[in-house]
Amino acid sequence: MGNNGAFTAFEATVIATYNKGVLDKELLSSFMEQYRGMDIDSGGMRGTLSNDGMDVVGITIKTFGGEIPKRPDLPKDHLTWSPEQYDINDAYNDELWGKFNEITDRFGWA
């Protein structure tokens, strides 16, 4: 089990800085560098959204110049999803988190 608290702190810092309009790649890199070699765990993600509705994963991808995958158009109630819709959602999450992990890997996040 990794450090959930570290991810929670990272998320809060990124969201607050992004909402102020001052987050750029250099500043985000300095935030991320602080967690080098730490077993930072996304299980600490609170799901906080920025003023424009983005989460820390999307903000990170966007700030590093990546393209955020388009969220699939699925019913809001996941309990009504078909197996194919679950597969579509899983593929979306794999792509999204893959892009995020490509960035965090540069900073030695375990």
Image: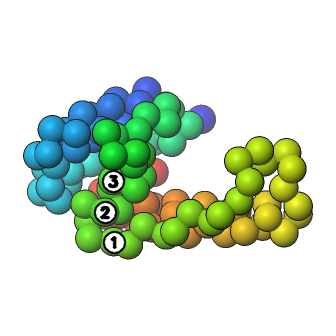
Residue type, mark 3 in image: Ile
| Earlier-in-chain disc, 3 versus 1 | 3
Judge from the rendering whether residue 36 lies leftward or rightward of residue 97; answer left or right.
left
Residue matched to label 3: 59
Cα separation, mark 3 vs mark 1, equals 10 Å
Q: Does 58 appear above or below 8?
A: below
Query: Local crowd at mark 3 within 10 Å, few (<14), some, or many (≥20)?
Result: many
Judge from the rendering whether residue 95 lies leftward or rightward of residue 81; answer left or right.
left
Disc 3 + disc 1, Cβ < 8 Å: no
Residue type, mark 2 in image: Lys
Cα separation, mark 1 vs mark 2, equals 5 Å
Q: Which mark is residue 66?
A: 1
Front residue of 9/55: it is 55
The secondary structure type at the circle numbered 1 is loop
Disc 3 + disc 2, Cβ < 8 Å: yes
* Residue at figure coordinates x 49%, y 69% from the top left: 69
Front residue of 101/34: it is 101
User: Does residue 98 appear in the picture of this structure?
Assistant: no
Front residue of 107/76: it is 76
Q: Which mark is residue 62?
A: 2
* Residue at figure coordinates x 26%, y 70% from the top left: 65
